[in-house]
Image (spheres, rainbow, N blue to C red):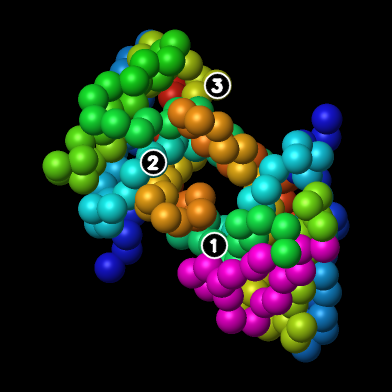
Amino acid sequence: NAGVTQTPKFQVLKTGQSMTLQCAQDMNHNSMYWYRQDPGMGLRLIYYSASEGTTDKGEVPNGYNVSRLNKREFSLRLESAAPSQTSVYFCASRDRGLLRETQYFGPGTRLLVL
Amino acid sequence: QKEVEQNSGPLSVPEGAIASLNCTYSDRGSQSFFWYRQYSGKSPELIMSIYSNGDKEDGRFTAQLNKASQYVSLLIRDSQPSDSATYLCAVTGGTSYGKLTFGQGTILTVHP
C-alpha cells in the first residue's frame, strides 16, 4: 500500500502559468481533500470531495479548481498561478470507521510561483 | 476570528519532562478533535483523536477535552528529543464531511 501519493514533489511556475497537482490514494476511501500550508497559518482547506462524483469548496477556493476523476484520484488545478499561491499543498483521504476517523496525508507538493 | 487557536510557541522542555499543548475552538458544534504531529518538511501525522469529554491516553500521550470550555489539550509525558516537531490541533463539525479546521501549530523542542 502506497497510501496517498502526490505528484510533483516540487514545482516552480511563472505568474500566469497553469498546472495540475495530482493525488491518488489506494485505501478505498470515499472522501478526499486538498489543503494548503503557509508559514505560521496551519493548514487551510481548499476543496474537498465527500464521495466520488462530488466536490465542494473549502475555506480558500479562489484561484483553484478540482476534479474527482474516480474514487482513487483527486486533482487540483491552478489555471493562472499567482505569487500568493506559493505554498505547500497536501492531499488527504479519510478513513471513517464506526468509532473513529483518520485523515491520511500525502507527502506534499512544494509550489513556488515567481 | 480564527476558529482554532493554539498557544503560541515555541515551547521548549527538557528531556523527560511533560510537554503541555493547548488548543481552543470557537464552533460549539465541533464534534471530533485531533492532534497531528508534523516534522519539518514532512506531512502531518495523526497521533491522537478524541470525541467525548475527559481524558484519552495512548502510551506517552494524553488528550483532554472539555467541550463546555471549548478546550482540548495534549500532554506528552517523558518527552524525548524525537518528539521535537510542530503539533497541530484540528477539529471537525458534525456535518462537515470530515473537513478539518487547523490551528496554527505549536513548535515543540525537547532538549537533551
> Given the image, on which type of amino acid does mark 1 rest?
Leu
Upstream in the sequence, badge 3 or badge 2?
2
* x, y percent for residue B38: 56, 38
Q: Which residues are magenta?
A: A54-69
Amino acid type indicated by mark 3: Ser
Percent from the top left, x then y, of residue B99? 50, 55
Helix, strand or loop under label 3: helix
Instruction: Check disc 2 and report its element: helix, strand or loop.
Output: strand
Residue that numbered label 1 is attached to = A45
Residue A62, magenta (yes or no): yes
Q: Which residue is mark 2?
A: B32
Q: CA distance from mark 1 to mark 2?
A: 17 Å
Is the residue marked by circle 3 packed among few (<14), some (14-19), or many (20+) residues within 10 Å?
Answer: few
Q: Residue furthest left?
A: B68
Q: Estimate the x, y position of residue B35 in percent, counting from the top left.
A: 44, 36
Pick the residue in front: B66 or A111: B66
Q: Is disc 3 in contact with disc 2, using a CB cutoff of under 8 Å?
A: no
Residue neighbourhood size for the residue with mark 1, other residues' Cα within 10 Å, grouped as few (<14), some (14–19), many (≥20): many
| Disc ID at residue A90 | none
Q: Is residue A90 visible?
A: no
The answer to whether the residue labelled 1 contacts the one labelled 2, judged by CB atoms less than 8 Å apart, is no
Eyeballing the image, is A104 above or below A64? above
Q: Quadrant of residue A105?
A: top right
